[in-house]
């Protein structure tokens, strides 16, 4: 082993200038070739991928027992292995071999090195198992993205490349399945260095894919359950028009109740003012002999105002029921537990039980809503009847009071 390392060191010193210059020229050649001839649809197999393969090749080679001449051929093969994509995808390895041969012959590279580069390029085929240490190195370098923390990004570039080049169009979930199959069944590292230093990150990437796959599977299962439930209860689900009917009717009932309360408050305020003015300004002056003729009109006005106030209070006075119900009443649908007056004295567990009885019975739900609307209508009818009487009493009282005042002044 020491002799091999020493021999490698000597050869490296002798060929350092040549190798460095040739690699720089090759790098410039590949960059120019990709810029001028590689279609923009190749989002993965491009110059960036080539640079990544070259770096990985050097990393493995520097930690392997190979001579400098072999390392030089490896690096050249890494730079040139995907140049065939500039002409076609299918059989690009053979095209890459032809491009590499023509280029290296122009660079006056020896035939032995050219032949080795050609073999290494062909060894990058997906279905070809490596036979030599050099082939194992470039094979692992070509798939080094499996063991990088940016694997998800490069993988997405490859998926989009397949789509743009019309090779295949995979959904996100289908692509995950393909990656899992590749990680677990088709790919493994061949060199000792990659197996020792890259396997951990590769396994980490696989776990990340499996987690996303599992999460997506749970999501699909939930959507499938929802779809089945939707189909199952499609006929039982309420029509949107029915929902709108209940919602609109309830809103109208509440608005009408607010209007009634506002009208009652107006009458209360007006009659309270009339009584206040009468008590403070008119009634104290009635004991004078000159004002006794105003006693009857004032009394009529005050009495009608008091009657209006009483009727207004009756129209706005809340009517709370017992606040209790029995299980028997709930089961027989004899109580409306949607109204607070029917449950405010009940324990929470009893009320929860009653609500569950309603929730899981569609007919009970709509019967309860209908009953609630009907009871609101009954209350509104009572309010508006009392308001009508209140306005009538107030109007009659004002008319009679005015007539009484006119008659009183006329008699004087």
Image (spheres, helix red, strand yellow):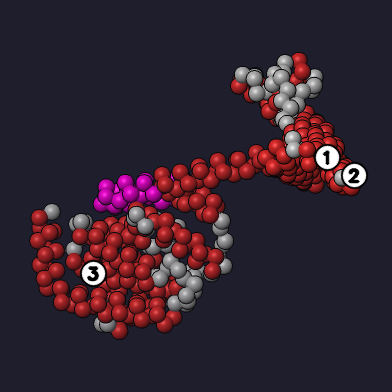
Which disc, if any, is residue 398?
A: none
Residue holding disc 3: 72
Residue 197 part of the magenta segment: yes
- 249 is higher (above) or lower (below) than 354: below
Magenta region: 184-205
Percent x, y of residue 154: 41, 61
Residue holding disc 1: 293
Percent x, y of residue 127: 45, 57
Secondary structure of the residue carrying tag 1 is helix
Secondary structure of the residue carrying tag 3 is helix
- Give the spatial CA distance, label 2 vs label 1: 8 Å
Percent x, y of residue 400: 88, 42
- 265 is higher (above) or lower (below) than 313: below
Sequence-earlier tag: 2 or 3:
3
Residue 53 part of the magenta segment: no
Q: Nearer the viewer, mark 3 or mark 1?
A: 1
Percent x, y of residue 81: 37, 69
Residue holding disc 2: 411
- 15 is higher (above) or lower (below) than 269: below
* Contact? badges 3 and 1 (CB < 8 Å): no
Residue 205 is at least partly visible in this image: yes
Name the image quarter holding residue 272: top right
Residue 101 is at least partly visible in this image: no
């Amino acid at each position: 082993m020491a002799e091999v390392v020493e021999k490698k060191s000597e050869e490296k010193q002798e060929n350092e200038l040549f190798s460095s210059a040739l690699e720089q020229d090759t790098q410039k050649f590949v960059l120019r070739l990709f810029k001028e001839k590689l279609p923009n649809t190749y989002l993965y197999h491009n110059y960036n991928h080539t640079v990544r393969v070259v770096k990985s090749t050097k990393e493995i080679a520097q930690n392997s027992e190979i001579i400098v001449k072999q390392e030089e051929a490896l690096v050249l093969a890494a730079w040139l292995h995907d140049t065939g994509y500039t002409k076609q995808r299918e059989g690009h390895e053979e095209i890459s071999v032809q491009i590499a041969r023509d280029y290296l012959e122009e660079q006056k590279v020896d035939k032995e090195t050219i032949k080795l580069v050609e073999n290494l390029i062909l060894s990058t085929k997906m279905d070809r198992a490596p036979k030599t240490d050099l082939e194992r190195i470039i094979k692992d370098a070509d798939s080094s993205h499996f063991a990088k923390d940016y694997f998800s990004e490069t993988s997405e570039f490859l998926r989009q490349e397949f789509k743009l080049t019309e090779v295949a169009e995979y959904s996100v979930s289908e692509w995950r399945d393909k990656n899992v199959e590749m990680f677990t069944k088709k790919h493994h590292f061949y060199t000792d260095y990659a197996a020792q230093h890259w396997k951990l990150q590769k396994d980490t990437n696989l776990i990340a894919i499996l987690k996303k796959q599992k999460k997506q599977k749970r999501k699909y299962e939930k959507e499938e359950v929802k779809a089945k439930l939707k189909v199952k209860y499609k006929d039982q689900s309420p029509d949107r028009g029915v929902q709108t009917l209940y919602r609109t009717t309830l809103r109208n009932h509440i608005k009408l109740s607010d209007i009634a309360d506002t009208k009652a408050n107006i009458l209360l305020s007006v009659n309270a003012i009339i009584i206040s003015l009468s008590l403070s300004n008119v009634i104290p002056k009635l004991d004078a002999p000159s004002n006794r003729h105003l006693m009857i009109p004032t009394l009529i006005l005050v009495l009608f105002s008091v009657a209006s106030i009483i009727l207004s209070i009756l129209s706005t006075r809340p009517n709370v029921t017992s606040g209790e119900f029995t299980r028997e009443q709930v089961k027989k649908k004899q109580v409306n537990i949607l109204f607070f007056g029917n449950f405010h004295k009940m324990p929470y567990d009893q009320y929860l039980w009653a609500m569950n009885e309603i929730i899981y019975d569609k007919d009970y739900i709509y019967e309860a809503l209908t009953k609630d609307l009907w009871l609101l209508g009954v209350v509104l009818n009572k309010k508006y009847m009392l308001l009508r009487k209140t306005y009538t009493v107030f109007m009659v009282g004002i008319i009679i009071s005015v007539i009484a005042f006119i008659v009183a002044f006329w008699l004087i």
